[in-house]
Image (tube, rainbow, N blue to C red):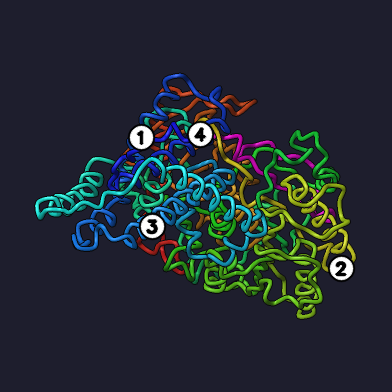
Amino acid sequence: MFTLFRKKPYIVPFSLFISGMALAIWLLLRLVLSLQVGFSQMESSEIIGIFFKGLWFDIAALTYLVVPWLLLSAATPNALRSKAWVNKARWLMAFLVMFGLLFGAVSEFVFWQEFTTRFNFIAVDYLIYTKEVIGNIRESYPVPLILLGIALIVMTVLFALSKLIRFDSEQQSAKKKLSLISAAIALPVLSYQFANIDQMEFSKNSYANELAGNGVFSFSAAARRNELDYDKFYITLPQTQALGLLKSIGVNRQPTGAAGIADNNQDAKPLGPFTRRPKNVVLISAESLSASYLGIYGNKENLTPYLDKLARESLVFDKLFATGTRTVRGLDALSIAIPPIPGQAIVHRPNSAHLATIGELLEAKNYATFFIYGGYGVFDSMNTYFMGNDYKVFDRTDFDEATIQSENVWGVDDESLFNNSLNILDQHVKTGQPFFAHIMTTSNHRPYTFPAGKIDLPQGSREGAVKYTDYAIGQLIENAKTKPWFKDTLFVIVADHCASVAGKTKLPVEKYHIPLFFYAPDLLPAGHYSRIASQIDIVPTLLDVLGTSGAQHFYGQSMFEAAAKKAPERAFISNYQALGYYKNNKLVVLSPKQSVETYQIDPQTLEAHLGSTDVNLVNEAVVYYQTTARAYKHGDLKEFIGAE
């Protein structure tokens, strides 16, 4: 029965054993992820590159992983090396290391389901918020069973291997110990010198590039590059030239000084299609609500029956694009209206108080400004950001437990959020002060749980969560119709970002398409806004509609004014490194190492194909992103600060 095993086991150094296990697990993970994506998504050369380039990154990561074992081997006295308990300790360490490697592979598999990338700065960021992240995992997956399964697999493999090998327990000479120490120093130095995360970009296919990576290596690189300095990593222009070009394309940013704030010439502000100005605004940013889920944008699954009905009574924006891939990017766009700068969102950065946000500008105009969130506002520094910019902040900790129907680690159900929001606004309107309320939902987020009996789809799926969010928005609107302040209020319904942005290209334009409704039946006739627009255009549009000053401070443009002037249509899309500028059916993508790519975009399908460089369009992209990054860096996004 055991004839396949050698009578004399192989003698294997512990560090070599760990290396073999790591390479095998990482290879298996890469194969599983590749099969999930589908080899049909890649060319033959890209498939080959995935595994050869992947081996390079695996070895690069391994050079760091083996360091403690090389040093431990060198430090173990010869008198102990052959002891029985030391050998048992080696097998225990082998179990722990292999368990950790396999657990890491499973974690990366889970991360891939959510983001279709290797570990990146999002994974680094999530380490700060272990309560929400671990809670989300526990509510979404059978964690105890997964851990038990991993342990059983590891024990089975090690038991089988124990028949084939034994660990080296021979005496070590001083020369051997010195060589181990030298290797422990040289290997990571060589890896740092010759391997870098930019080498993942070996093809034009983003799937292939991500699959070639190694999670441990990319995680470490992301920790170092969490905030990218635009001037260091991206193509630039002389600042004087950049500012001049910015003005020539219609962005003539004005300071938000005291004189500008005091100006309140409402009649001078564009009213657009509104019959009269709203007194109040309720801005609902819905978690991960891609346009592709709504029937009004072509979905056939009836996931959003209420919103599809509401569209017939709203001004629907047909071609609005999100700036990024995470909630904090959406919050940047919906508060400070800037193109997304590389690295972390402004919401999550230091020195983000007293910026010229819509909340701060309206607060100076005697509006009450609210940020109401269904989750814990400490996550992603939301409470700090909005409180620092003159919003009154409410999160789940401020809601009476009796008002909460259900909750998970990310937040309370959307109905409970909306009901509490209405209570907050009802209490406020007694003062007679106009209000601007930004409400951020959480239900359309894994683990996709919500109150039972509300919709005809089960919990636990994205489709069910989308339909529940639609139902909850419907309940909010119907309840709001009974309020005396309803007839004077504009409801803005928009997504913070899309549910998924995975695609063959770095920035698949169609995956950034999000819904935007303006609903105010007493103020605004129904219709469609068919021009391409960016999420950063919402803030200046609202300021103009309200008739207040400040719209000229932002990089976004008032959409109704742009339509009247027939200004060029453009949008900004990004991930944490790639910065996209979409205009004239072309997409310019700026990346680290001063890389520039231009894609031709099909205006109907939004599919991308590599195209020829348009120098003028590249320069426009550069000036938007360069001047925005420098404005933040130099404090020129602050309120009461002059334009740069």
- The answer to whether the residues at label 1 and label 4 have Cβ atoms under 8 Å apart is no
Task: State the image coordinates of residue 175 (x, y, percent, origin top left).
Answer: 9, 51
Query: Of helix, strand and loop, which one carries label 1?
Result: helix
Front residue of this view, candidates 593 and 412: 412
- Eyeballing the image, is 378 above or below 513? below
Residue at which label 3 appears: 93
- The answer to whether the residues at label 3 and label 2 have Cβ atoms under 8 Å apart is no
Q: Looking at the picture, which amino acid does disc 1 mark?
A: Leu
Label 3 or label 4, whichever comes before in sequence order: 4
Query: Of helix, strand and loop, which one carries label 4?
Result: loop
Residue at which label 2 appears: 483
Residue 102 on the magenta segment:
no
Q: Looking at the picture, which amino acid does disc 3 mark?
A: Met
Q: Is residue 261 left or right of residue 174?
A: right
Residue 312 visible at all: yes
Q: Is residue 199 left or right of residue 246?
A: left
- Eyeballing the image, is 59 above or below 601? below
Label 2 or label 1, whichever comes before in sequence order: 1
Residue 518 on the magenta segment:
yes
- Eyeballing the image, is 204 above or below 172? above
**Disc 2 vs disc 1: which is toward the camera?**
1
Q: Quadrant of the C terminus?
A: bottom left
Tell me the distance, in whole angstroms, between the alpha carbons under discs 4 and 2. Answer: 80 Å
Residues shaded magenta: 508-532
Q: Residues within 10 Å of mark 1 (few under 14, many from 20)?
A: some
**Disc 3 vs disc 4: which is toward the camera?**
4
